């Protein structure tokens, strides 16, 4: 006896029907469409630790970037057939064309692309995230599918460069039945009735294939399937075959073994490795780019798992989702929504309310027309970002096993849902979590993304956004070439990048990475590379760009317990070269070049302020002081560095007002003066808020500019003042308005005196926070 069960991949109705058929047939061999290289892994389906959704991951052993996935959900007919076989001690094998053949073809295509000058472009579409499209399409498609058009019904295993199958069988059958939605037709005929007529489906597929052009890739795959079937018939009498319904007519076709052998002859094979990896329903959904996915995996999971009161239980779950989000939904809402869904099904002649009906009922009753609430139900229920699980002892590369062990130790469970993780680096567990996440980013596994507000800046606090993606399994396989543990692999990767980097800024960034990821063995080669690049680079802006990361590393290394003894010498040498080269670097600068130098200098100044050693800071300020007295210095830089010196107590108020007064004279063009003012005021307007004399001087200069000159200077001034925070602009306006009405430069609603006694009381606490004693010098406001 031999029976062929043509199914729709990931169809709950098909899954239930296959289980009933297997219980009735009781075969002594089960053949399932899938990669035969994974035969040794099917036994894991009996392990309670393998929880769908999961996927078979296949990759070329020597080129892990060439990979493919075969996803399974709990409602996949193939998964249920595997589970039936292993629990009944019945041999079960995959009998599709070995993926090793297609992997070899893909490697050849990639090699040809590289010879043609496109070496950086993958030639097969088997990149992480797209592997499911380049894998075995019938575990990922080929039979009846949910997609409504031929583009979505493209054969995933054909790769991005292969033509799509010219016909959508589900669309053809739905159209013949008078349906405009193939998904709805399949639900009505198969899923909601629970008894697909395998013979009728096979006849329908045969009729469609008789009129449709054949896909060459399908012909090769089906030749191999028939070859495996012939061999199985010699050893087994009662065989069950579970495959995409599209292939059933080909398995029954009268084609000789010689013809199939000729079609398969001459194909090369690659060495491939397979394992099970966790998958998600989000990746299974067709809108994620998975050609034979289903648009509503969460709904199909519910259809498969629920045996009675399907609609009621679904809407109860939808109400729970809304309640969890703070939406008041009562039992009366649920009762009314159930009645509406069932009434819509009757009006439309459907055997049972489908997803369209329950969605409309939820929109009208539970969500009261609010599309945002409906989207919430869609994300959490219809798609359902569920992540599968694999056993701890599942065969995997050592790097993946090490990561799994660290995830358990640090209590960081992967999840497909985005979650925020706040870390306090003074706690050992949080520090270890931070190091692990930074190391994974180096290996191309961005499980955690630092929050833009300060993750990775080396402070005591870090905030991460975590979200696990299935394709990280491939990234781990690719990274396994660097080492067997996360630490060793990250270290080797950083050393490789340091040796390959040609820019000083790239190597400098790696120094900070070594700190964040705690890679002590990477420091010597990275510092050697840094010293070499710094010696060869004579561009002062490049040298300045390198200092901030080094300063942060020196400042916060003790927070993470990292030894940074050798880094101080390198940083001091870089700053010395900057101070020596800056005078010649600021000659004859354009406006754009001056802005670039200003930004780099601001970053250096802020970075030096992080260091405990006062020597580098004093040398830096001496360099700026010598430059601000030059007549050929660009006004933007002269103004900015005058402000820096004033705030560092290198200039008193009288000297600062004198310099500003020289700039704001009739002998200086308004445009040049505006540039000086722009530089002086960049970084915030608090100086003008608290120094009434400087504000008065700027106000007088502005009032004295002639009409044409004012028009010329206005864009620069507007840009400068527009960069201030709104409270600063308001306070400046209050002071100017107060001065205009009273004639007193210090007038204005926001003017306040300084309570020197209260300021002194705060100094001990401030000194304890900063780690040094702070004196208090009372300044006159005159």
Image (cartoon, rainbow, N blue to C red):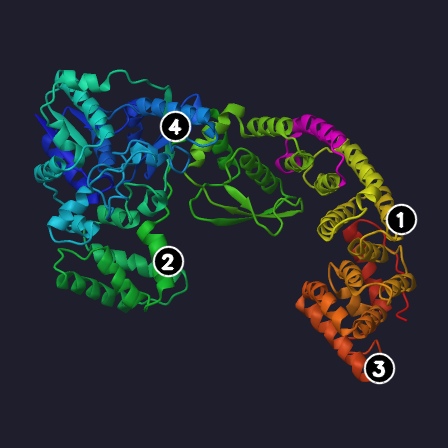
Q: Nearer the viewer, mark 2 or mark 1?
A: 1
The front one of 389 and 778 is 778
SS for dot 4:
loop
As for residue 539 lying within the magenta part, the answer is: yes
SS for dot 3:
loop
Is 637 above or below relative to 40? Answer: below
Residue located 43% across and 31% down the image: 122
Task: Give the magenta part as a residue range.
Answer: 514-540
* Mark 2 and mark 1: Cα distance apart in space: 62 Å
- What residue did someone put label 4 on? 394
Q: Position of residue 734 (x, y in %)?
A: 74, 76
Q: Nearer the viewer, mark 4 or mark 2?
A: 2
Circle count? 4
Q: Nearer the viewer, mark 3 or mark 4?
A: 3
As for residue 738 lying within the magenta part, the answer is: no
The answer to whether mark 3 and mark 2 are in CB contact below 8 A is no
Q: Residues within 10 Å of mark 3 (few under 14, many from 20)?
A: few
Q: Earlier in the sequence, mark 3 or mark 2?
A: 2
Residue 357 in which image quadrant: bottom left
Q: Position of residue 536 (x, y in %)?
A: 74, 30
* Mark 1 and mark 3: Cα distance apart in space: 38 Å
Q: Earlier in the sequence, mark 1 or mark 4?
A: 4
Q: Residues within 10 Å of mark 4 (few under 14, many from 20)?
A: some
Residue 749 seen in this snapshot: no
Q: Residue furthest front?
A: 708
- What residue did someone put label 1 on? 626
Q: Earlier in the sequence, mark 2 or mark 1?
A: 2
- What residue did someone put label 3 on? 743
Residue 59 seen in this snapshot: yes
- What residue did someone put label 2 on? 376
Q: Earlier in the sequence, mark 3 or mark 4?
A: 4
Is 99 above or below relative to 316? Answer: above
């Amino acid at each position: 006896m031999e029976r062929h069960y043509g199914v729709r991949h990931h169809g709950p109705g098909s899954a239930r029907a296959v289980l009933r058929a297997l219980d009735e047939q009781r075969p002594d061999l089960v053949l399932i469409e899938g990669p035969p290289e994974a035969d040794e892994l099917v036994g894991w389906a009996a392990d309670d630790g393998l929880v769908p959704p999961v996927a078979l991951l296949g990759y070329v052993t020597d080129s892990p970037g060439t990979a493919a996935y075969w996803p399974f959900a709990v409602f996949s007919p193939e998964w249920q057939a595997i589970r039936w076989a292993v629990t009944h001690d019945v041999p079960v094998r995959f009998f599709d064309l070995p993926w090793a053949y297609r992997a070899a073809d893909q490697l050849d295509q990639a090699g040809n692309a590289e010879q043609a000058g496109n070496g950086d472009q993958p030639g097969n579409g088997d990149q992480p995230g797209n592997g499911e499209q380049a894998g075995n399409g019938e575990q990922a498609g080929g039979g009846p599918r949910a997609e409504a058009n031929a583009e979505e019904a493209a054969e995933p295993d054909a790769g991005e460069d292969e033509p799509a199958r010219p016909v959508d069988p589900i669309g053809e059958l739905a159209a013949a039945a008078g349906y405009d939605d193939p998904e709805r037709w399949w639900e009505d005929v198969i899923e909601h009735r629970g008894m697909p007529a395998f013979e009728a489906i096979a006849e329908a597929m045969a009729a469609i294939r008789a009129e449709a052009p054949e896909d060459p890739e399908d012909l090769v795959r089906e030749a191999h399937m028939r070859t495996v079937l012939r061999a199985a018939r010699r050893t087994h009498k009662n065989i069950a075959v579970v495959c995409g319904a599209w292939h059933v007519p080909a398995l029954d076709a009268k084609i000789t073994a010689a013809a199939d052998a000729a079609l398969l002859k001459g194909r090369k094979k690659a060495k491939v490795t397979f394992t099970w990896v966790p998958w998600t329903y989000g990746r299974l959904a067709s809108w994620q780019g998975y050609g034979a996915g289903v648009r509503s995996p969460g709904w199909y999971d519910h259809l498969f798992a629920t045996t009675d009161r399907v609609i009621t239980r679904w809407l109860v779950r939808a109400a729970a989702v809304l309640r969890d989000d703070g939406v008041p939904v009562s039992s009366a809402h649920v009762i009314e929504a159930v009645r509406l869904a069932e009434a819509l099904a009757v009006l439309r002649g459907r055997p049972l309310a489908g997803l369209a009906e329950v969605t409309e009922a939820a929109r009208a009753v539970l969500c009261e027309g609010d599309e945002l609430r409906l989207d919430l139900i869609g994300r959490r229920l219809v798609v359902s970002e569920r992540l599968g699980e694999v056993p701890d002892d599942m065969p995997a590369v050592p790097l993946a096993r090490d990561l799994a062990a660290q995830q358990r130790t640090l209590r960081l469970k992967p999840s497909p849902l985005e979650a925020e993780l706040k870390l306090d680096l003074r706690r050992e567990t949080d520090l270890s979590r931070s190091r692990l996440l930074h190391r994974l980013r180096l290996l191309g596994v961005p499980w955690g993304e630092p929050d833009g507000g300060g993750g990775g800046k080396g402070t005591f606090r870090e905030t991460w956004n975590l979200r696990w993606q299935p394709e990280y399994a491939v990234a781990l396989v690719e990274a396994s070439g660097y080492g067997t543990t996360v630490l060793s692999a990250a270290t080797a990767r950083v050393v490789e990048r340091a040796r390959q980097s040609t820019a000083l800024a790239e190597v400098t960034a790696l120094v900070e990475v070594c700190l964040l990821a705690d890679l002590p063995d990477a420091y010597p080669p990275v510092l050697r590379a840094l010293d070499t690049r710094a010696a060869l680079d004579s561009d002062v802006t490049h040298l300045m760009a390198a200092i901030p990361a080094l300063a942060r590393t020196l400042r916060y290394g003790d927070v993470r317990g990292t030894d940074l003894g050798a880094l101080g010498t390198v940083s001091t040498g870089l700053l010395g070269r900057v101070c020596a080269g800056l005078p010649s670097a600021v000659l004859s600068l354009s406006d754009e070049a001056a802005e670039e130098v200003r930004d780099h200098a601001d970053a250096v100044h802020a970075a030096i302020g992080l260091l405990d050693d006062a020597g580098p800071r004093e040398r830096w300020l001496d360099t700026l002081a010598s430059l601000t007295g030059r007549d050929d210095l660009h006004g933007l830089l002269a103004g900015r560095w005058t402000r820096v010196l004033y705030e560092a107590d290198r200039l008193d108020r009288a000297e600062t007002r004198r310099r500003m007064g020289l700039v704001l004279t009739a002998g200086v063009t308004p445009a040049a003066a505006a540039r000086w003012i722009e530089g002086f005021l960049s970084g915030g307007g608090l100086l003008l808020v608290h120094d009434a004399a400087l504000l008065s001087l700027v106000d007088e200069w502005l009032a004295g500019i002639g009409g044409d000159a004012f028009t010329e200077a206005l864009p620069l001034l507007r840009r400068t003042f527009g960069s201030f925070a709104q409270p600063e602009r308001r306070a400046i306006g209050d002071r100017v308005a107060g001065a205009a009405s009273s004639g007193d430069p210090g007038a204005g609603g926001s003017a306040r005196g300084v309570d020197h006694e209260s300021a002194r009381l705060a100094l001990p606490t401030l000194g304890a926070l900063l780690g040094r004693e702070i004196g208090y010098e009372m300044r006159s406001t005159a």
